[in-house]
Image (tube, helix red, strand yellow):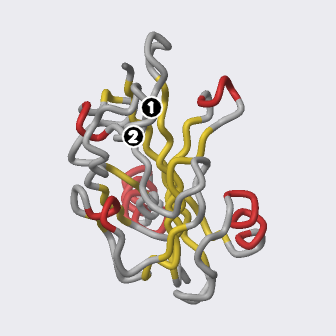
Amino acid sequence: MKKLLTLLCFSSLPLFAHAAAFSLKSADFADNGVMKKALGGNDKNNLSCSGKNLSPALSWANPPVGTQSYVLLLTDPAGAKGLGVTHMLAYNIDATRNKFQQGELSKGGNFSYGTNTPGTQNYYGPCPPAGAGYHHYNFVLVATDLANGSLPAGLSHTELVAKLKGHALGSASLVGRLEN
């Protein structure tokens, strides 16, 4: 009888197996790893921004069922003396997509940009203040049930989050660290 119960328990395992989690990764750095200086921002008006403004390679897998588009946020919660900095808002990313090559987000493409903290609509690479130690740059990919192209370009972080309420299906995140 024990053998029969054991056999039944093991034979039903696939029925209870969990689906793989929605995940985001980069070939350029491990989660909570140090990012290369080249991935930092480049701004002639900010001496702390001496990188190449090269966006990292990103890839994702196992999106939630019903995903119609993605939103990618890049933020530094400790930036601006703790008030936070939004470095990039990219959205209207097609649901069939599962990666960005290194540098692709820096150039723009078949997606929309929102308005970042510096007031531009592009990728603004990490720029931690000199001597401040490591800042943590959060890459958050949100799967939505919104049709691709349904969000207007130029939204602020606050406006974008408001439009995503009730439409976010799940998220995956990755943290990169950088210091000057």
Q: CA distance from mark 2 to mark 1?
A: 5 Å
Number of dots carrying numbers:
2
Q: Secondary structure at mark 2?
A: loop
Q: Position of residue 52 (x, y in %)?
A: 25, 42
Using the image, determine if residue 25 lies above or below residue 100: above
Q: Amino acid at mark 1?
A: Asn
Vertical position of residue 53 compared to residue 73: above or below:
above
- Measured along the vertical axis of the image, is residue 9 above or below residue 34? below
Residue topped by disc 1: 46
Q: Which residue is mark 2?
A: 43
31 displayed left or right of 19: left
Q: x, y percentage for residue 143?
A: 54, 70
Residues at discs 2 and 1 in contact (Cβ within 8 Å): yes
Q: Please name the amino acid that badge 2 sits on.
A: Asp
- The kind of secondary structure element at disc 1 is loop
Q: Would you place residue 65 above or below residue 99 in this image?
A: below
- Residue 3 point in image, percent of width and height: 37, 53
